[in-house]
Image (tube, grey):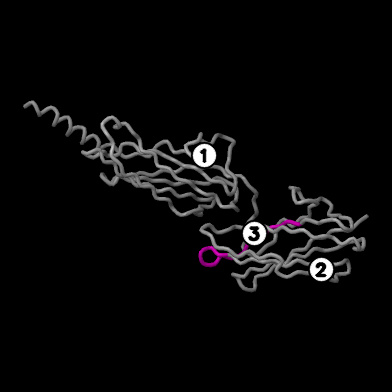
Amino acid sequence: MRFAVPIAAFALASLLQAQTPLKAVLPRVSQSEDGPTLQGGDAFLSGEQVFFSFQAENYKTGTTGKVQLTGHVEAFDPKGTPISPSDEIVIGTTVSQEDKDWKPKLRSQVQLPSIAPPGNYKIKFDVEDLQTKQKTAGEITFPVHGRAVESSPELTVRGLGFYRTQEEENPLRVAAYRPGDVMWVRFDITGFKHGEQNSIDVSYDVSVLKGDGTALFSQEAAAVEKSQAFYPQPWVPGEFNLNLQSTMSLGPYTLVITAHDGIAAGQTVTAKAGFRIEQ
């Protein structure tokens, strides 16, 4: 008779534990491991690392204190495209009676693509208690700031602009230089196709035409971008400078960019922009 109460209490505790649903709680994104939660107005930038964690509660503790959990974390861009492989997190440990209120923390790190469109990104996460076979899931969003380049269904050169220095953020309103100046040029190429493993093969030619249309300078394959990545790169940034000869005649000139898509053989596009040489 003296064992009836402990056995009943143990049976009741086991029954309550079995009936209590597993929960994933306190999801948080931060800029450092176990750092403060991202606050309103804060945002990540392309190429940064996102630290994510959540906790599990109502998991089963075995008769010997055993805890067995498996979680998964996966991040998506604003269009729902995964930006990295799903991360599996395994917790297998033994807790003592003093740690009965312990909540396992599942941690993961997400590397944002170096070229990532801005917007609200999403992390989907789940956890399974391997002893009860219960599963639960959740999701959380976080903002990413950065430069946006409009997508295109076909190969396109966007934002072709002239700059006086490499550090300038805004293009010149009037593209005018003096003989002997250094001319900086920036643009983006988008609308190219992706091959196996999200491979890309993008190149561009550069030429400068005089006012009468004759070629002053020309270079084929001035830059070539060949790469593979888990995340499909949405655009290729282009940047270069030209040393304008001190003997160049005053007047109008035309810069010509011809982009090529090596994955979609034959897909080519040309963009032109005018500038002047003045005293």
Which residue was labeled with disc 1?
Answer: 32
Which residue was labeled with disc 2?
Answer: 217
Q: Amino acid at mark 3?
A: Val
Q: Nearer the viewer, residue 140 or 36?
A: 36
Task: Bin the neighbour count of mark 2 within 10 Å (Cα to Cα): few under 14, some 14-19, many 20 and up.
Answer: few
Residue 192 among those drawn in magenta:
yes
Q: Is residue 42 left or right of residue 162?
A: left
Residue at 82 percent of width and 56 percent of height: 182
Residue at 59 percent of width and 48 percent of height: 46
Q: Magenta region: which residues?
A: 185-199
Q: Position of residue 119 (x, y in %)?
A: 58, 46
Q: Amino acid at mark 2?
A: Phe
Give the image quarter of residue 176.
bottom right
Residue at 86 percent of width and 55 percent of height: 177
Task: Bin the neighbour count of mark 3 within 10 Å (Cα to Cα): few under 14, some 14-19, many 20 and up.
Answer: some
Q: Which mark is residue 236?
A: 3
Residue at the bottom extreme of this rendering:
266
Assign a secondary structure to mark 3. strand
Q: Are marks 2 and 3 in contact (CB under 8 Å)?
A: no
Q: Nearer the viewer, residue 39 or 269?
A: 39
Of circles 2 and 3, the one toward us is 2
